[in-house]
Amino acid sequence: MALVQFTNLRPHDLLVEDGRIVAGGTPDEVVDCDGLLALPAPVDAHIHPDKTTWGQSWLSREPARNLRELIDGDVAARQGMTATVAERAGALMDHAIARGARAWRAHVDVAPVYGLDNLHGVRQAAAERAHLLDVQTVAFPQLGLLTAPGTAELLERALQEGADILGGLDPIGVDGDLHGHLDVLFGLAQRHGVPLDIHLHDGGAAGVETVHEIARRTAASGLKVTISHAFSLAGEVAPETVKLLAEAGVALTTCALGGDPVISPDTFAGTGVLLAAGSDGVRDPWTPFGDGDMIARAHLLAYRTDARTDEELAACYAVVAHGGAELLGLARVELNPGDPADFVLVRSDSVAQAVVERPIPHLVVRAGRVIARDGRLV
């Protein structure tokens, strides 16, 4: 049992039994949480743990003028990494768990230069922490699909070996063939019965054209499809596009990175289009920033979208908690009887204050067990 402070309410006892919140009973153990605020545990819906240098010595990054130079720099930098993927990804998982992460959707590079080593490493790290973190793995063609011969065959092998989701990358901007790229992706996904999660950095007309084509194919196939980043949907979005996405059930993720376009929670509020958020790269060859803390990511989302009112700030936290949970197929946590006992306890008066101040959770609770305290696993 934990004593928690709900927004605008007096403190309540929160009772947990068999991993779920219950309406009443006599607890075997009492944890006095001193009137802290309970928040649903956040979800990282887009992260690249195979690339991270977390826990390793500092990596100096080379300048890059475009996506292709970033990709090439990533490949070159990884050749000098001595720690295994499992070690680096596992270290980042531990940190994210201690900061409250409930689950991850982990994009993992699959390409001829890597084979399936990255997938094996991330899956190993996830298996060792399965009692602490739910992890979905995405087989992701970071180096291109059609432009990197042999990648399609590797993606098929990745799905056969347990990857949960099939990824794609800029059908026009990287592969230069919208329909050819999507033919391969949707064909593989339908054959293996898996969802799709497609990176889309292309903006402008190319980005909108790709969004529309993905929505049309999603509606026709019945597959579960996510478009990640979706820079072309940042800012004003045409009603036709919103309608296409909602009717097809296409979900979106945003990461609130640097100078990249960011989708505002307001854009799709009440439309039926699901929005989740993620860390993207964390301390990897692409960026020196990031730490896997999704409370901090809600802060970045709020800052980048100019959230000011309590409602706007709370909406950003809802994206990282409820949006992420729905995208990954997890039960929603609203701290009601019957909900999973997956929550964090922070010293804040409200959700809005927590988003602004980014507190390190005093306690992280998973399935009713305290698994981290003050930013450290217990």
Image (spheres, rainbow, N blue to C red):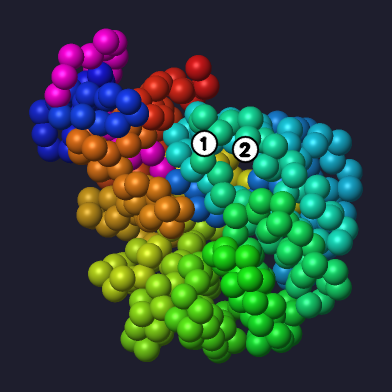
Identify the residue position indicated by label 1 in the image: 133
Instruction: Give the secondary structure at mark 2.
Output: helix
Res. 280 visible in picture: no
Q: Amino acid at mark 1?
A: Leu
Give the answer, above or below, for where 140 lies relative to 334. Answer: below
Quarter occupied by residue 113: bottom right
- Circles 1 and 2, Cβ within 8 Å, touching? The answer is yes
Res. 149 visible in picture: yes
Which of these two is toward me, 65 or 8? 8
Left or right: where 211 falls relative to 34: right
Quarter occupied by residue 291: top right
| Percent x, y of residue 75 | 84, 56
Instruction: Give the secondary structure at mark 1.
Output: loop
Q: Amino acid at mark 2?
A: Ala
At horizontal 25% and vertical 43% (from top left) the residue drawn is 334
The residue stretch that appears in magenta: 24-42
At horizontal 46% and vertical 23% (from top left) the residue drawn is 372
Query: Is-magenta flag for residue 31?
Result: yes
Q: Which mark is residue 126?
A: 2
Marks 1 and 2, Cα distance to the nearest angstrom? 7 Å
